[in-house]
Amino acid sequence: MVDLALSEVAEGVFELRLPIPFEDGLVNVFLFADGDDVDLLDCGMNSDESVNAIRAAVSQVGAKRIRRLVVTHIHPDHYGAAGVIAGDGGADLYLHRLEVPLVNPRYVELEHLVKEVHKYLLVNGVPAGEADVLSNSQRALSQVVSPAEPAVQLDGAETLEMGRRQLRVEWTPGHSPGHICLYESSEKLLFAGDHMLPELSPNIGLHPQSTPDPLHEYLMSLERLAAYEPQKILPAHGRPFTDAASRVAALVAHHRRRLDQILEIVSAGERSAWQLALELWGPREILYEKRLALQEGLAHLQALAVEGRLEKLVSPSAVRWRPPASRA
Ligand SMILES: [Zn+2]
């Protein structure tokens, strides 16, 4: 059962916690009330339980309809119910334009992406049998997502009216190419999506739908938001928190440690990302996590190659990583 106790995280802004089958089992979405209307930030997965909870919350805040649905990024737990809530007389959907082209290949016409991911797994050293299973894991996710056409494509830096508040769109690539946060400067409130989480380090992965250097983009956008010195951070997973500076320092330190660890492993000799991921994390039980581990390892390898600390070798059949010539 969904606990429908809404918490008012700022005047007229309510947090609703919806069920999801991964991470800590909950995603936080936010309702911004304005009389008969309410604006929604993220919408959970497409399940009856989750959508009914949103509907109940809308009437609980005294509203009759959802006016705008702003989505931080198109992962199933944030975007899944978009097709139910937006479109066809429903809410207007606002989405960053780098997220828009990811929707169709990921959730509607999956076959091309499944093939592309399969090839990407093979060239990165994943054994064929395992690549079959891992490339198919996307199919299950598409079942909890109902896509919708965006009414507005965002670039970042827009001022949006949410409820009775004005919030600025902050484009924060890394976890997803068009991930956005919303920032309200008067009360220094940061609605952080998956960008800045209190306990987890969000998955930053290099894969066929990512940008070419997601880790550097992530670290840069993390530090840009920390410079605002937000007073209250409202994440999509976990509880609200206040100390952005120390959280950002911890996240940055985590990635720097991982970069050093990877550099040390690869300094022993050339290898594939899959070999590296197995050495780094050990063989994993859960296949979905294995793919995330590979993607995360690749994002770090790519950052090291961009910085010139590793060499990246590519051919049609393999992507390999090795120490720079002078150090080999
Ligand atoms: Zn996400």
Image: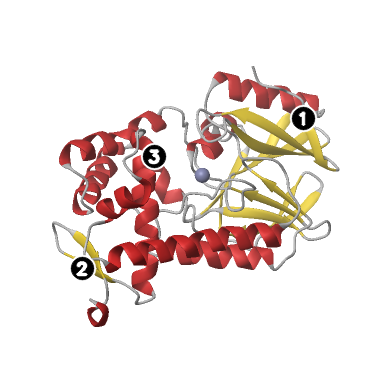
The x, y position of residue 122, in whole percent, is 19, 48
Q: Is residue 119 left or right of residue 52?
A: left
The x, y position of residue 319, in whole percent, is 21, 60
Residue under label 1: 6
**Label 1 – label 3 distance at C-alpha:** 31 Å
Q: Is the residue marked by circle 3 packed among few (<14), some (14-19), or many (20+) residues within 10 Å?
A: few
**Label 2 – label 3 distance at C-alpha:** 26 Å
Q: Are marks 2 and 1 in contact (CB under 8 Å)?
A: no
Q: Earlier in the sequence, mark 1 or mark 3?
A: 1
The x, y position of residue 101, in whole percent, is 41, 50
Q: Disc 2 on helix, strand or loop?
A: strand
Mark sitting on residue 289: 3
Q: Is the residue marked by circle 2 packed among few (<14), some (14-19), or many (20+) residues within 10 Å?
A: few
Q: Amino acid at mark 3?
A: Glu
Q: Is residue 325 left or right of residue 85?
A: left
Q: Is the residue marked by circle 1 packed among few (<14), some (14-19), or many (20+) residues within 10 Å?
A: some
Q: Amino acid at mark 2?
A: Leu
Q: Amino acid at mark 1?
A: Leu
Q: Disc 3 on helix, strand or loop?
A: helix
